[in-house]
Image (cartoon, helix red, strand yellow):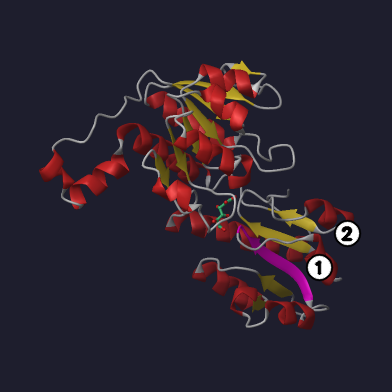
Amino acid sequence: MTQEVLVTGPIPAAQLEELEEIYTIHRLWQAEDPEAKLAELRNNITAIVSTAFFGVSARIIKAFPNLEIISHFGVGYDNVDVAAAKERGIVVTNTPDVLTDDTADIGIGLTLCVFRRLVEGDIYVRSGQWAIKGKLPLGRALRGRKMGIVGLGRIGQAVAKRAEAFGIDVSYYGQRRKEGVNYPYHAGLEQMAEAVDILMVTCPYNTATHHLINAKILKSLGKTGVLINIARGKIVDEGALIDALEGGVIAGAGLDVFENEPDVPSALCRLDNVVLQPHQGSATHETRAAMAQLVVNNLRLYFEKAEVLTPV
Ligand code: 8YV
């Protein structure tokens, strides 16, 4: 009997095809009435492929009594109710490692854009302002800056490596000191924010990190400080960030993620001291294919040998 897999959002075509050759696939994002589709498939689904934009809540887990595995397309699995899954003995996997470099590149790219005014510069040239107003106001050098990384996991460490190549001094904050790394550790986030020029958010989102970056932390970062967020929008209190950017409490921000994607507050879009990206961390052909392949490989291994490569 072939397994029936519910795919909640689009994944690269080649890997979707590979899934389709082995299993019966149901594309939830193409369903006219997703709720009706979920009800119709109730007893059939044994696996779910979830994505950043459509996760697996406790309600969905409950809706599928024969569900055995959730293979998540992404490293961050905050929209999958892992506790509810584990309670039922459902296996959950994610896609770590394969997206580390690309995501770290976006972190450094945003930092460069904010300090060297790259996006402003592009608009300046295209809109003809260069010829009218002359030179763009000067940016700020990256060399010699201090970067504080919030959460020195795989992506945090890849950002640190890149930052060092730019002559940036790296330190980090996390719940505990990391074994085997030489970067200075801060036991307090506020204290680290005070000590650095760039606050780089790379930690996972969970109840402990909800609005971890609040008005107080932004005040500590200070008026020459820059916030970069490549992790999850909800780690930052977006309202407090807008106030801090508008009021000159911090100098600028580079944001790849937002509290309520794809809706971005118009107040952020009006500010020229921010650079905004539409959740691009893993958005390359190469990385998305590698992520999707890991999703497929986890499912295959699970159904063939009751094993997985990257369990959560
Ligand atoms: C998304 C991400 O998964 O891996 C993560 O945690 O946020 C991204 O890579 C990607 O947009 C695919 O849904």
Residue 14 circle label? none
Residue that appears at 55% across and 67% down: 15
- The amino acid on which the numbered mark 1 sits, given as a three-letter code, is Leu
Q: Is residue 91 left or right of residue 30?
A: right
Residue 17 sits above or below residue 277 on the image? below
Decide: few, some or many residues near mark 2? Use Cα within 10 Å; few <14, some 14-19, many ≥20: some
Residue 165 percent across, percent down from the top left: 38, 26
Q: Main secondary structure of the magenta part?
A: strand
Disc 1 within 8 angstroms of ligand 1 (CB): no
Residue that badge 1 annotates? 67
Residue 105 percent across, percent down from the top left: 43, 41
Residue 280 visible (yes or no): no
Residue 221 visible (yes or no): yes
Residue 39 sits above or below residue 309 on the image? below
Queried whether the magenta region covers residue 251, the answer comes back as: no
How far apart are the two marked residues, 2 and 1, measured between alpha carbons? 9 Å
Q: Quadrant of the N terminus?
A: bottom right
Residue that appears at 41% across and 20% down: 145
Decide: few, some or many residues near mark 1? Use Cα within 10 Å; few <14, some 14-19, many ≥20: many
- The magenta region covers 45-52
